[in-house]
Image: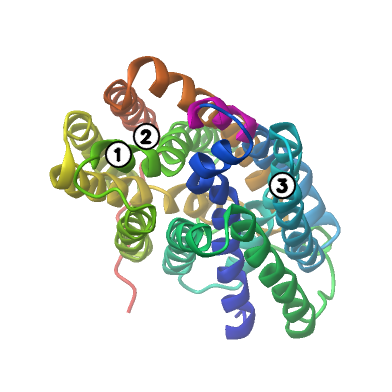
Amino acid sequence: MTSRPVTLLLNIAHAVDHMFLLIFAAAVGTIAADLGVARWEDLMPYGTGAYLLYGLGALPAGRLGDLWGRRSMMVLFFFGMGLSAVLCALARTPWELAGAMTLIGVFASIYHPVGIPMLVQHAQRPGATIGLNGLSGNLGIAVAALLTGLLIKWLGWRAAFTVPGIACLVLGLIFLWVVPPEREAPARRKSGTAAIALSPAMLARALAVMTAASITGSLLFNFTTNGNAQLLNERFRGIVEEPAVLGAMLAGVYAVASLAQVVVGRLIDRYALKPLYLAITLAQVPILLATAHAQGWRLYALLLCAMIFIFGAIPFTDSMIVRYVDDRMRSRVAGLRFTISLGVSSLAVWLLGPIVKGMGFGTLLTVMAVIALCTSSVVLLLPSEQRRPALT
Protein backbone atom coordinates (compact mmCIF):
# COMPACT_ATOMS: atom_id res chain seq x y z
CA MET A 1 0.00 0.00 0.00
CA THR A 2 1.37 3.44 -0.94
CA SER A 3 2.17 5.55 2.15
CA ARG A 4 0.04 8.61 2.91
CA PRO A 5 2.83 11.18 2.33
CA VAL A 6 3.59 9.65 -1.07
CA THR A 7 -0.12 9.55 -1.94
CA LEU A 8 -0.50 13.18 -0.90
CA LEU A 9 2.45 14.30 -3.02
CA LEU A 10 1.21 12.34 -6.04
CA ASN A 11 -2.24 13.92 -5.70
CA ILE A 12 -0.70 17.39 -5.36
CA ALA A 13 1.34 16.64 -8.49
CA HIS A 14 -1.90 16.00 -10.38
CA ALA A 15 -3.18 19.41 -9.27
CA VAL A 16 0.09 20.99 -10.42
CA ASP A 17 -0.14 19.20 -13.78
CA HIS A 18 -3.53 20.68 -14.67
CA MET A 19 -3.00 24.02 -12.99
CA PHE A 20 0.16 24.90 -14.92
CA LEU A 21 -1.42 24.06 -18.27
CA LEU A 22 -4.34 26.41 -17.58
CA ILE A 23 -2.56 29.48 -16.24
CA PHE A 24 -2.18 30.63 -19.85
CA ALA A 25 -5.89 30.18 -20.60
CA ALA A 26 -6.91 32.02 -17.43
CA ALA A 27 -4.55 34.94 -18.16
CA VAL A 28 -4.73 35.04 -21.96
CA GLY A 29 -6.67 38.31 -22.15
CA THR A 30 -4.17 40.17 -19.96
CA ILE A 31 -1.17 38.57 -21.68
CA ALA A 32 -2.50 39.50 -25.13
CA ALA A 33 -2.85 43.16 -24.12
CA ASP A 34 0.65 43.23 -22.61
CA LEU A 35 2.33 41.58 -25.60
CA GLY A 36 0.54 43.79 -28.14
CA VAL A 37 -1.87 41.16 -29.53
CA ALA A 38 -5.20 42.75 -30.52
CA ARG A 39 -7.55 39.92 -29.43
CA TRP A 40 -7.20 37.04 -26.99
CA GLU A 41 -8.49 34.67 -29.69
CA ASP A 42 -5.42 35.49 -31.80
CA LEU A 43 -3.04 34.58 -28.95
CA MET A 44 -4.78 31.31 -28.02
CA PRO A 45 -3.17 29.18 -30.80
CA TYR A 46 0.27 29.91 -29.30
CA GLY A 47 -0.64 27.54 -26.47
CA THR A 48 -1.20 24.60 -28.83
CA GLY A 49 2.37 23.31 -28.50
CA ALA A 50 1.86 22.71 -24.78
CA TYR A 51 -1.11 20.42 -25.40
CA LEU A 52 0.47 18.73 -28.40
CA LEU A 53 3.58 17.80 -26.39
CA TYR A 54 1.40 16.99 -23.37
CA GLY A 55 0.03 14.16 -25.50
CA LEU A 56 3.05 13.20 -27.61
CA GLY A 57 5.41 13.20 -24.63
CA ALA A 58 3.29 10.69 -22.72
CA LEU A 59 4.49 7.73 -24.81
CA PRO A 60 8.22 8.09 -24.05
CA ALA A 61 7.37 9.18 -20.48
CA GLY A 62 5.35 5.99 -19.93
CA ARG A 63 8.10 3.83 -21.39
CA LEU A 64 10.72 5.46 -19.15
CA GLY A 65 8.39 5.09 -16.16
CA ASP A 66 8.21 1.30 -16.64
CA LEU A 67 11.84 0.77 -17.65
CA TRP A 68 13.75 3.45 -15.68
CA GLY A 69 11.51 3.99 -12.68
CA ARG A 70 8.43 6.00 -11.75
CA ARG A 71 10.03 7.87 -8.85
CA SER A 72 12.84 9.21 -11.05
CA MET A 73 10.36 10.40 -13.64
CA MET A 74 8.25 12.19 -11.03
CA VAL A 75 11.35 14.03 -9.76
CA LEU A 76 11.92 15.18 -13.34
CA PHE A 77 8.26 16.24 -13.51
CA PHE A 78 8.44 18.58 -10.49
CA PHE A 79 11.68 20.30 -11.44
CA GLY A 80 10.85 20.52 -15.13
CA MET A 81 7.42 22.04 -14.50
CA GLY A 82 8.81 24.60 -12.05
CA LEU A 83 11.59 25.80 -14.34
CA SER A 84 9.31 25.93 -17.39
CA ALA A 85 6.79 28.12 -15.55
CA VAL A 86 9.55 30.57 -14.64
CA LEU A 87 10.56 30.70 -18.32
CA CYS A 88 6.96 31.58 -19.23
CA ALA A 89 7.16 34.54 -16.87
CA LEU A 90 10.30 35.76 -18.68
CA ALA A 91 8.73 35.65 -22.17
CA ARG A 92 8.73 38.95 -24.11
CA THR A 93 7.02 37.88 -27.34
CA PRO A 94 4.19 35.48 -28.23
CA TRP A 95 6.67 33.03 -29.75
CA GLU A 96 8.87 33.03 -26.63
CA LEU A 97 5.76 32.32 -24.58
CA ALA A 98 4.78 29.55 -27.01
CA GLY A 99 8.20 27.92 -26.58
CA ALA A 100 8.05 28.06 -22.78
CA MET A 101 4.47 26.74 -22.80
CA THR A 102 5.59 23.86 -25.00
CA LEU A 103 8.21 22.97 -22.38
CA ILE A 104 5.46 22.90 -19.76
CA GLY A 105 3.63 20.44 -22.02
CA VAL A 106 6.74 18.22 -22.26
CA PHE A 107 7.11 17.88 -18.49
CA ALA A 108 3.35 17.80 -17.84
CA SER A 109 3.16 14.72 -20.09
CA ILE A 110 4.98 12.72 -17.41
CA TYR A 111 2.25 12.74 -14.80
CA HIS A 112 -0.64 10.66 -16.18
CA PRO A 113 1.33 7.67 -17.53
CA VAL A 114 3.70 7.65 -14.53
CA GLY A 115 2.09 9.27 -11.49
CA ILE A 116 -1.27 7.48 -11.65
CA PRO A 117 0.21 3.95 -12.12
CA MET A 118 2.58 4.74 -9.24
CA LEU A 119 -0.41 5.78 -7.12
CA VAL A 120 -2.60 2.71 -7.82
CA GLN A 121 0.03 -0.01 -8.01
CA HIS A 122 -0.81 -1.18 -4.46
CA ALA A 123 -4.32 0.29 -4.12
CA GLN A 124 -7.01 -2.00 -2.68
CA ARG A 125 -9.80 0.24 -4.05
CA PRO A 126 -8.39 1.62 -7.29
CA GLY A 127 -11.62 3.33 -8.34
CA ALA A 128 -11.79 5.36 -5.13
CA THR A 129 -8.07 6.13 -5.38
CA ILE A 130 -8.46 7.35 -8.96
CA GLY A 131 -11.56 9.35 -8.03
CA LEU A 132 -9.73 11.18 -5.24
CA ASN A 133 -6.78 11.74 -7.54
CA GLY A 134 -9.13 13.16 -10.16
CA LEU A 135 -10.57 15.51 -7.54
CA SER A 136 -7.04 16.72 -6.83
CA GLY A 137 -6.35 17.31 -10.51
CA ASN A 138 -9.50 19.31 -11.03
CA LEU A 139 -8.92 21.32 -7.87
CA GLY A 140 -5.72 22.33 -9.65
CA ILE A 141 -7.93 23.68 -12.44
CA ALA A 142 -9.96 25.60 -9.85
CA VAL A 143 -6.78 26.98 -8.29
CA ALA A 144 -5.56 28.07 -11.74
CA ALA A 145 -8.73 30.10 -12.25
CA LEU A 146 -8.73 31.65 -8.77
CA LEU A 147 -5.01 32.14 -8.12
CA THR A 148 -4.27 33.46 -11.61
CA GLY A 149 -7.00 36.08 -11.29
CA LEU A 150 -5.72 37.21 -7.90
CA LEU A 151 -2.05 37.29 -8.91
CA ILE A 152 -2.86 39.24 -12.06
CA LYS A 153 -4.79 41.76 -9.99
CA TRP A 154 -2.05 42.16 -7.38
CA LEU A 155 1.25 41.48 -9.19
CA GLY A 156 0.62 41.02 -12.93
CA TRP A 157 0.44 38.02 -15.23
CA ARG A 158 4.13 37.15 -14.93
CA ALA A 159 3.69 36.46 -11.21
CA ALA A 160 0.88 34.03 -12.13
CA PHE A 161 3.63 31.80 -13.60
CA THR A 162 6.50 32.66 -11.24
CA VAL A 163 4.83 32.00 -7.88
CA PRO A 164 3.50 28.50 -8.77
CA GLY A 165 6.81 27.72 -10.52
CA ILE A 166 8.85 28.36 -7.39
CA ALA A 167 6.33 26.39 -5.30
CA CYS A 168 6.72 23.43 -7.69
CA LEU A 169 10.51 23.44 -7.26
CA VAL A 170 10.02 23.27 -3.49
CA LEU A 171 7.62 20.32 -3.95
CA GLY A 172 10.30 18.56 -6.01
CA LEU A 173 12.75 18.82 -3.09
CA ILE A 174 10.12 17.47 -0.69
CA PHE A 175 9.37 14.58 -3.06
CA LEU A 176 13.07 13.66 -3.22
CA TRP A 177 13.21 13.61 0.59
CA VAL A 178 9.94 11.79 1.31
CA VAL A 179 9.67 9.17 -1.46
CA PRO A 180 12.15 6.28 -1.14
CA PRO A 181 13.95 4.97 -4.25
CA GLU A 182 12.32 2.02 -6.01
CA ARG A 183 13.94 -1.37 -5.55
CA GLU A 184 13.45 -2.15 -9.22
CA ALA A 185 11.68 -0.63 -12.21
CA PRO A 186 8.13 -1.99 -12.81
CA ALA A 187 9.05 -3.75 -16.07
CA ARG A 188 11.75 -5.79 -14.30
CA ARG A 189 9.38 -7.28 -11.74
CA LYS A 190 8.84 -11.01 -12.05
CA SER A 191 5.08 -11.00 -11.53
CA GLY A 192 2.09 -8.75 -12.04
CA THR A 193 -1.66 -8.94 -12.22
CA ALA A 194 -4.68 -7.42 -13.92
CA ALA A 195 -7.94 -7.19 -11.98
CA ILE A 196 -9.96 -8.76 -14.82
CA ALA A 197 -8.47 -11.20 -17.32
CA LEU A 198 -9.65 -10.69 -20.91
CA SER A 199 -8.84 -12.65 -24.02
CA PRO A 200 -6.32 -10.93 -26.32
CA ALA A 201 -9.12 -9.99 -28.75
CA MET A 202 -11.34 -8.55 -26.02
CA LEU A 203 -8.40 -6.71 -24.45
CA ALA A 204 -7.56 -5.14 -27.82
CA ARG A 205 -11.20 -4.11 -28.22
CA ALA A 206 -11.31 -2.61 -24.72
CA LEU A 207 -8.10 -0.64 -25.31
CA ALA A 208 -9.38 0.65 -28.67
CA VAL A 209 -12.65 1.80 -27.10
CA MET A 210 -10.75 3.34 -24.20
CA THR A 211 -8.53 5.32 -26.57
CA ALA A 212 -11.42 6.53 -28.76
CA ALA A 213 -13.50 7.57 -25.75
CA SER A 214 -10.46 9.27 -24.28
CA ILE A 215 -10.05 11.34 -27.47
CA THR A 216 -13.60 12.64 -27.43
CA GLY A 217 -13.59 13.15 -23.68
CA SER A 218 -10.30 15.07 -23.87
CA LEU A 219 -11.74 17.30 -26.60
CA LEU A 220 -14.58 18.28 -24.26
CA PHE A 221 -12.15 18.76 -21.39
CA ASN A 222 -9.84 21.02 -23.43
CA PHE A 223 -12.64 23.07 -24.99
CA THR A 224 -14.24 23.74 -21.60
CA THR A 225 -11.23 24.28 -19.36
CA ASN A 226 -9.54 26.54 -21.91
CA GLY A 227 -12.68 28.40 -22.94
CA ASN A 228 -14.78 28.72 -19.79
CA ALA A 229 -13.04 31.86 -18.52
CA GLN A 230 -13.83 33.73 -21.73
CA LEU A 231 -17.33 32.20 -21.88
CA LEU A 232 -18.15 33.66 -18.45
CA ASN A 233 -16.57 36.95 -19.45
CA GLU A 234 -18.86 37.15 -22.50
CA ARG A 235 -22.10 35.84 -21.01
CA PHE A 236 -21.82 37.88 -17.78
CA ARG A 237 -21.14 41.20 -19.49
CA GLY A 238 -23.11 43.87 -17.65
CA ILE A 239 -23.73 41.51 -14.69
CA VAL A 240 -20.25 40.67 -13.34
CA GLU A 241 -17.14 42.06 -15.03
CA GLU A 242 -14.42 42.05 -12.33
CA PRO A 243 -11.78 39.46 -13.46
CA ALA A 244 -11.01 38.31 -9.91
CA VAL A 245 -14.72 37.72 -9.20
CA LEU A 246 -15.20 35.83 -12.47
CA GLY A 247 -12.12 33.76 -11.62
CA ALA A 248 -13.58 32.91 -8.21
CA MET A 249 -16.90 31.96 -9.81
CA LEU A 250 -15.14 29.64 -12.25
CA ALA A 251 -13.04 28.17 -9.45
CA GLY A 252 -16.30 27.41 -7.63
CA VAL A 253 -17.63 25.55 -10.67
CA TYR A 254 -14.48 23.43 -10.89
CA ALA A 255 -14.31 22.76 -7.14
CA VAL A 256 -17.92 21.53 -6.96
CA ALA A 257 -17.73 19.59 -10.24
CA SER A 258 -14.54 17.88 -9.10
CA LEU A 259 -16.45 16.10 -6.34
CA ALA A 260 -18.16 14.07 -9.07
CA GLN A 261 -14.92 12.15 -9.59
CA VAL A 262 -14.89 10.96 -5.98
CA VAL A 263 -18.47 9.69 -6.31
CA VAL A 264 -17.80 8.06 -9.69
CA GLY A 265 -14.58 6.47 -8.41
CA ARG A 266 -16.46 4.75 -5.59
CA LEU A 267 -19.17 3.56 -8.00
CA ILE A 268 -16.52 2.11 -10.33
CA ASP A 269 -15.26 -0.11 -7.48
CA ARG A 270 -18.79 -1.48 -7.00
CA TYR A 271 -20.37 -1.77 -10.45
CA ALA A 272 -19.55 -2.57 -14.08
CA LEU A 273 -17.91 0.21 -16.08
CA LYS A 274 -20.08 0.18 -19.19
CA PRO A 275 -23.52 1.28 -17.89
CA LEU A 276 -21.99 3.90 -15.59
CA TYR A 277 -19.84 5.39 -18.33
CA LEU A 278 -22.73 5.39 -20.81
CA ALA A 279 -25.10 7.18 -18.42
CA ILE A 280 -22.59 9.95 -17.69
CA THR A 281 -21.71 10.61 -21.33
CA LEU A 282 -25.35 10.64 -22.45
CA ALA A 283 -26.21 13.19 -19.76
CA GLN A 284 -23.66 15.60 -21.25
CA VAL A 285 -25.58 16.00 -24.52
CA PRO A 286 -28.76 17.87 -23.44
CA ILE A 287 -26.88 19.94 -20.87
CA LEU A 288 -24.37 21.22 -23.45
CA LEU A 289 -27.18 22.01 -25.90
CA ALA A 290 -28.99 24.04 -23.23
CA THR A 291 -25.77 25.82 -22.25
CA ALA A 292 -25.26 26.97 -25.84
CA HIS A 293 -28.20 29.40 -25.57
CA ALA A 294 -28.00 30.44 -21.91
CA GLN A 295 -26.92 33.77 -20.44
CA GLY A 296 -26.07 35.11 -17.00
CA TRP A 297 -26.86 33.03 -13.94
CA ARG A 298 -28.76 30.38 -15.94
CA LEU A 299 -25.57 29.89 -17.95
CA TYR A 300 -23.63 29.55 -14.70
CA ALA A 301 -25.96 26.84 -13.36
CA LEU A 302 -25.85 24.89 -16.64
CA LEU A 303 -22.07 25.24 -16.87
CA LEU A 304 -21.78 23.74 -13.39
CA CYS A 305 -23.96 20.78 -14.47
CA ALA A 306 -21.96 20.31 -17.66
CA MET A 307 -18.64 20.29 -15.80
CA ILE A 308 -19.99 17.79 -13.24
CA PHE A 309 -20.60 15.26 -16.02
CA ILE A 310 -17.46 16.12 -18.02
CA PHE A 311 -15.28 15.72 -14.92
CA GLY A 312 -17.31 12.69 -13.85
CA ALA A 313 -16.30 10.87 -17.04
CA ILE A 314 -12.57 11.28 -16.41
CA PRO A 315 -11.90 8.35 -14.01
CA PHE A 316 -13.13 5.70 -16.46
CA THR A 317 -10.12 5.48 -18.78
CA ASP A 318 -7.60 5.18 -15.94
CA SER A 319 -9.87 2.64 -14.24
CA MET A 320 -9.93 0.56 -17.44
CA ILE A 321 -6.14 0.44 -17.46
CA VAL A 322 -6.06 -0.69 -13.82
CA ARG A 323 -8.80 -3.25 -14.43
CA TYR A 324 -7.47 -4.78 -17.64
CA VAL A 325 -3.66 -4.17 -17.80
CA ASP A 326 -0.78 -5.79 -15.88
CA ASP A 327 1.02 -3.27 -13.62
CA ARG A 328 4.38 -4.08 -15.24
CA MET A 329 3.26 -2.35 -18.43
CA ARG A 330 0.62 0.11 -17.24
CA SER A 331 2.79 3.19 -17.76
CA ARG A 332 3.47 2.21 -21.37
CA VAL A 333 -0.20 1.49 -22.10
CA ALA A 334 -1.27 4.70 -20.37
CA GLY A 335 1.38 6.62 -22.30
CA LEU A 336 0.21 5.23 -25.63
CA ARG A 337 -3.42 6.03 -24.84
CA PHE A 338 -2.53 9.51 -23.64
CA THR A 339 -0.34 10.24 -26.65
CA ILE A 340 -3.09 9.39 -29.10
CA SER A 341 -5.94 11.07 -27.23
CA LEU A 342 -4.12 14.24 -26.17
CA GLY A 343 -2.30 14.52 -29.50
CA VAL A 344 -5.66 14.69 -31.26
CA SER A 345 -7.47 16.74 -28.62
CA SER A 346 -4.73 19.38 -28.58
CA LEU A 347 -6.52 20.59 -31.71
CA ALA A 348 -9.17 21.94 -29.34
CA VAL A 349 -6.72 24.55 -28.03
CA TRP A 350 -5.76 25.58 -31.56
CA LEU A 351 -9.36 25.67 -32.81
CA LEU A 352 -10.92 27.34 -29.76
CA GLY A 353 -9.99 30.91 -30.64
CA PRO A 354 -10.87 30.72 -34.38
CA ILE A 355 -14.21 28.94 -33.74
CA VAL A 356 -15.34 31.44 -31.10
CA LYS A 357 -14.10 34.38 -33.18
CA GLY A 358 -15.88 33.16 -36.31
CA MET A 359 -19.05 31.51 -34.99
CA GLY A 360 -19.37 32.22 -31.27
CA PHE A 361 -19.66 30.12 -28.14
CA GLY A 362 -23.14 28.91 -29.09
CA THR A 363 -21.77 26.99 -32.06
CA LEU A 364 -18.85 25.67 -30.03
CA LEU A 365 -21.13 24.26 -27.32
CA THR A 366 -23.38 22.64 -29.94
CA VAL A 367 -20.34 20.95 -31.47
CA MET A 368 -19.36 19.76 -28.00
CA ALA A 369 -22.81 18.14 -27.58
CA VAL A 370 -22.21 16.19 -30.80
CA ILE A 371 -18.79 15.11 -29.50
CA ALA A 372 -20.43 13.87 -26.28
CA LEU A 373 -22.86 11.81 -28.35
CA CYS A 374 -19.89 10.29 -30.18
CA THR A 375 -18.39 9.29 -26.83
CA SER A 376 -21.61 7.50 -25.88
CA SER A 377 -21.62 5.61 -29.19
CA VAL A 378 -18.05 4.43 -28.58
CA VAL A 379 -18.78 3.34 -25.00
CA LEU A 380 -21.50 0.99 -26.32
CA LEU A 381 -18.66 -1.11 -27.79
CA LEU A 382 -17.04 -1.81 -24.42
CA PRO A 383 -16.96 -5.47 -23.32
CA SER A 384 -19.75 -6.23 -20.86
CA GLU A 385 -18.85 -7.28 -17.32
CA GLN A 386 -20.69 -9.08 -14.61
CA ARG A 387 -21.99 -6.67 -11.98
CA ARG A 388 -19.34 -6.37 -9.30
CA PRO A 389 -20.42 -6.89 -5.70
CA ALA A 390 -20.19 -3.94 -3.34
CA LEU A 391 -16.93 -3.77 -1.38
CA THR A 392 -17.25 -3.82 2.39
Quadrant where the N terminus lies?
bottom right
| Residue type beneath disc 2 | Val
Helix, strand or loop under label 1? helix
**Residue 59 location, quadrant:** top right
Q: Nearer the viewer, mark 3 or mark 1?
A: 1
Quadrant where the C terminus lies?
bottom left
Residue nearest the observer in this picture, 231 or 177: 231
Pointer 3 or 1: first along the chain: 1
Q: Which residue in the structure is indicated by mark 2?
A: 379
Report the residue at 30% width, 39% height from top. 281
Alpha carbons under labels 3 and 1: distance apart: 27 Å
Alpha carbons under labels 3 and 2: distance apart: 23 Å
Q: Which residue in the structure is indicated by mark 1?
A: 281
Report the residue at 74% width, 57% height from top. 86
Q: From the viewer's perspective, is residue 318 above or below residue 120?
A: above
Q: Position of residue 141 (x, y in %)?
A: 47, 56
| Residue type beneath disc 3 | Arg
| Residue type beneath disc 1 | Thr
**Residue 367 location, quadrant:** top left
Magenta span has 47?
yes
Q: Position of residue 212 (x, y in %)?
A: 49, 30
Colouring mode (rainbow / by chain / secondary structure / one colour): rainbow
Alpha carbons under labels 1 and 2: distance apart: 9 Å
**Image: magenta residue range:** 39-48
Helix, strand or loop under label 2? helix
Main SS of the magenta part reads: helix
